[in-house]
Amino acid sequence: MASSVVETPSCNEQRLLIVGLGLIGGSLAAALRASGFNGVIVACDPSEDEIARGVEMGLIDTGGVTLADQVAGATMIVLAVPVLAMESVMASLAGVLSQAAANVVLTDVGSTKATIRDCAERVFGAVPANMVLGHPIAGSEKSGVAAANPRLFADHNVILTPEPGVDPDAVARVRALWQACGANVLEMDVERHDQVLARTSHLPHLLAFSLVDTLARQDERLEIFRYAAGGFRDFTRIAGSDPVMWRDIFTANREAVLASLDDFEEGLAQLRHAIERGDSDALIATFDRASHARHYFDTLLNKTSYQAEYNMQPQGKVTYRVRPGGQAKGHLRVPGDKSMSHRSIMLGALAQGVTEVKGFLEGEDSLATLQAFREMGVAIEGPHQGRVTIHGVGMKGLKAPAGPLYVGNSGTAMRLFSGLLAGQAFDSELTGDESLTKRPMGRVADPLRLMGASIETAEGGRPPLKIKGGAALKGIFYDMPMASAQVKSCLLLAGLYAEGETRVREPAPTRDHTERMLNGFGYSVSREGDTCWLQGGGALSAGPIDVPSDISSATFFMVAAAITPGADITLEHVGINPTRIGVINILTLMGANLELLNEAEVGGEPVADIRIRYAPLKGIDIPVDQVPLAIDEFPALFIAAANAAGTTRLRGAEELRVKESDRIQAMADGLAILGVEHTVVDDGIDIVGNANAEVASYGGGRVDSLGDHRIAMAFAIAALRASDDIIIDDCANVATSFPTFVELANKIGMGVNVEGEND
Ligand SMILES: O=C(O)C1=C[C@@H](OP(=O)(O)O)[C@@H](O)[C@H](O)C1
Ligand SMILES: C=C(OP(=O)(O)O)C(=O)O
C-alpha cells in the first residue's frame, strides 16, 4: 500500500494581531508557532500580566493594552475576547482600522454567531467584506494564556460562518489560519451554527453547572464531594469552565439555548414519570436508545462504522483486492439470516411479552431495523453476540418516532415496514440510502392503498414513503404481479391491522418466513396452494427465536468450494427452508458435490450443515421455478456458471434488475472485464463457462460492485479461478448482510485485502 504524506497547510500572514490573549488567543499563537509560522504575532489584552506572560512563553513577539498601539500593519486581526465584549472591541477597532494593512482580514472566535454578526452590523453598518466570522470548537475548563496549548485545535472542527457578501479570498485566508493549527475547517450559516452549538455544547455546559451547583448547595456538600466518583467527575468536568465566558454565551444565544432546554426538560420529565410509575420498559427503552446512540457516536469519532465510512467517503470507496487462486477449505459458520433477523425484531416488537432472539445478524440492514423500533419506543437489549432481547409493546404499543425512520440499504425493511406502519395510529416516513432510494415501492404502495392506506411516494413510486396514520384498513385479496416475499409480507403485516381477511396469491413460491414466524408467535396464517391468508385484529405472543445461518451468505462459500479444485467446505447450521434452497438445487443440477448433514428443525425452520467438495460443473438451463427460490444467489451462481463446462442459461429473472443494483447488468459488466463470454437478455443471461481445472477460467481486472454487497462478494469468490488480481470497487455495503465476509474468505484460504481510498 502506498503511504501518503499529508502536508500541514501554511498560513502566510505577515502580521497577526490577536485581540484578547486568553486560552483561545494564546493557543492560537502557540499552534501557529508550532506550525513554523513565519509572520509576527502581536497581542492586545487589558491585562499587562497576560501580555508579559505571552512574551515570556515565546507565544507572541510583542503586545500591549491599547488597540491603537498594536494595529499598525496587521494583515489579520483575530478577535478572541468574550462574546459580550465583542461590540466595544469592534467599536475601538473601527476607529483605528485604517492603520492596518490595506488587505487586512478580520475574524473572531466567538461561540455564538448571530450576536456577533449583529455587533458587526451595528458598528460597521454591515458585516464588512473582509470579516469572516468563525468559531473553533475546542476549549478547556482552564483559562488564561498560561493554559495555552499548541494542540488545542488539532483535529478539532473550526466552523466558519461567512456572510453571503464576504470576499472569498478572506475566507480562504481564515481557513488557512486554522488549517495551519491542524483544525478541520467547515462552513455553515450563522443560524444553523447557533442551533447546533446550543444542543451540542451550550446545553451540556448548562447541565454541568446546574448539577454541581445543586449538589454544592446541599448541606453535606463536603461529604457528597468526598464520595463523588467517576460518574460525577465525567459529567461535570466542564462545570469548571470560565463563568464570564459562559454567562456571555447564554446571554448571547438565548433563543437557541431555550429551545434546546425545552426539548431536554421534556425528555427529563418523561424519565421522571417513568421512575415514579416504576415503568421499567420505558426506562430500558430510553437508556438503550441513548446507549446505542452513544456507541454509534464513538464509532463515528473512531471512524469504525460502515455508515461513517460511507458518509465520509460518499462513493463508498472501500476496495477489495483479491489475489488470484488460493484454497477453499474449512468449517465455517456464516452470520444469521437477514430475512429472519428483520422479522424477529418486527414481530417481537409487536408481541406481548419478551422475545429472546439468538443468531441475530449484526449487519447494517438488520441493525437499522432494530434502531427504527427503538425510535418507536420499543425497549431492545443487545445485540450482544447475536443475542437480542425485545420487550414487546403489543399490537398498538408503538409510539410515533421523532423523525423519519432510516432503513439504510434494505428493500426488505422498507417494504415490510410500509405494511406495518400503514396500520398505526401515527404518521411516519421511511427513508433509505442512495441505492434504496432508486428501488420501486409502488409494488407495496399500490396494494396498501387498495386496503385503505394513505401513502405518498416520490416520483416513480420511489422512496421516501410518507404514510398517514389512523387509516381504517380493510382486508383484500391480492393477486401479486411478481413473485415477491417482500410484497407478500408487507400485506400480511398490514393485514394484522385490517378488518377481515387479507389474502395474497403468489405466482410462484417465495420465502415464507413471515408466515412461519407469525405462526410461531401464535398468530394463525393459513395456506392453500399458492395463496395464504390471515384474519386481522389478533395478537402476537412472544417466544424464543433461533435464527439459523443465512443460506444467501453461505452461497458464496458453496460456490467457492464448487469451483476450486481440491476444495472441501462445511457450512454449519444453515437455514434450508424449502423456499430458500434454489441454490442447492441449481448447484446440484450443475454437478456439484453437495451433502446435507445433521438436518434438524429449530423454531419452525429446517437447518443443516452443508458440506461441499469440488467436482467439475456443467452448464445448465436453470429451471424457471427455481428462480424465486434462489433470487439473491444469482450473482454467486453466475460465477459458478463462468467455471462450468458449456453454457448456463437463466430466464424469468427480471426481478434481479431491481435489487440493490441491476444485478444482471452489474454482473455482465464485471464478467466482460474478466473476459467471460456472455449474452444479456431482458430477463436473464447466457454465460459460457471455462471448465479446465488445470488453468485459470478467466482473467483479472477492476470491476465495480456498484455498492451492491452481493456483486462485491461474487467477484471476490471469482478470484479463486482467475489468472490475475480482481480489484472490486465500492464494497462498503458488504457490511449490510455479511460483516465478517473478508475474515471468513481469508480463513478458507483466499487472499482478500481491503483497501481504503487513500491506500
Ligand atoms: O422477504 C425477504 O426477506 C426478501 C425477499 C426477496 O426480495 P423480493 O421479495 O423483492 O423478491 C429477497 O431478494 C430479499 O433479499 C429478502
Ligand atoms: C435484495 C436483497 O435485499 P433487500 O431487498 O432487503 O435490500 C439482498 O440482500 O440481496
Image: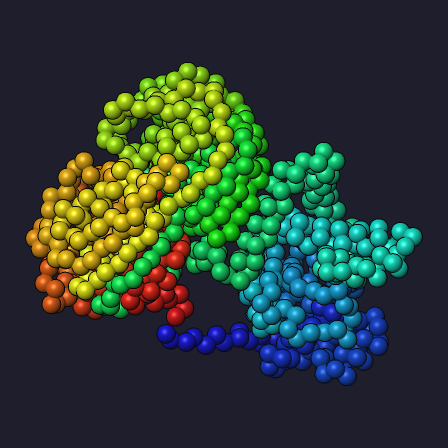
Quadrant of the frame with the C terminus: bottom left
> What is the x, y in percent for residue 342?
42, 40
Given the current orientation, which residue lies at the most extreme right position?
219
Residue 721 vs 484, above or below: the answer is below
Name above or below for residue 16 compared with residue 405.
Answer: below
- Say which quarter of the image contains residue 605: top left
Taking the spot 13% from the left edge, 54% from the top edge, the residue there is 617
Residue reaching furthest to the top: 500
Placement of 581 over or under 318, stated as above or below: above
Residue at image position (72%, 83%) is 58
Left or right of 476: which side holds 124? Answer: right
Q: Is residue 549 visible?
A: yes
Q: Left or right? Give the position of 145 relative to 711.
A: right
Q: Quadrant of the N terminus?
A: bottom left
Residue nearer the viewer, 702 or 640 = 640
- Report whether residue 115 is seen: no
Describe residue 426's horizontal placement relative to residue 630 as left or right: right
Colouring: rainbow
Q: Which x, y percent locates residue 650? A: 15, 43
Which of the 4 image quarters holds residue 246? bottom right
Location of ligand 2 given as a quarter of the image = top left
| Observer-nearest of 110 and 691 | 691
Q: Position of residue 651 (x, y in %)?
A: 15, 40
Residue at image point 16% right, 52% down: 592
Question: Picture coordinates of residue 733 (x, y %)?
Answer: 38, 53
Rendered residue at 87%/58% (across/down): 223
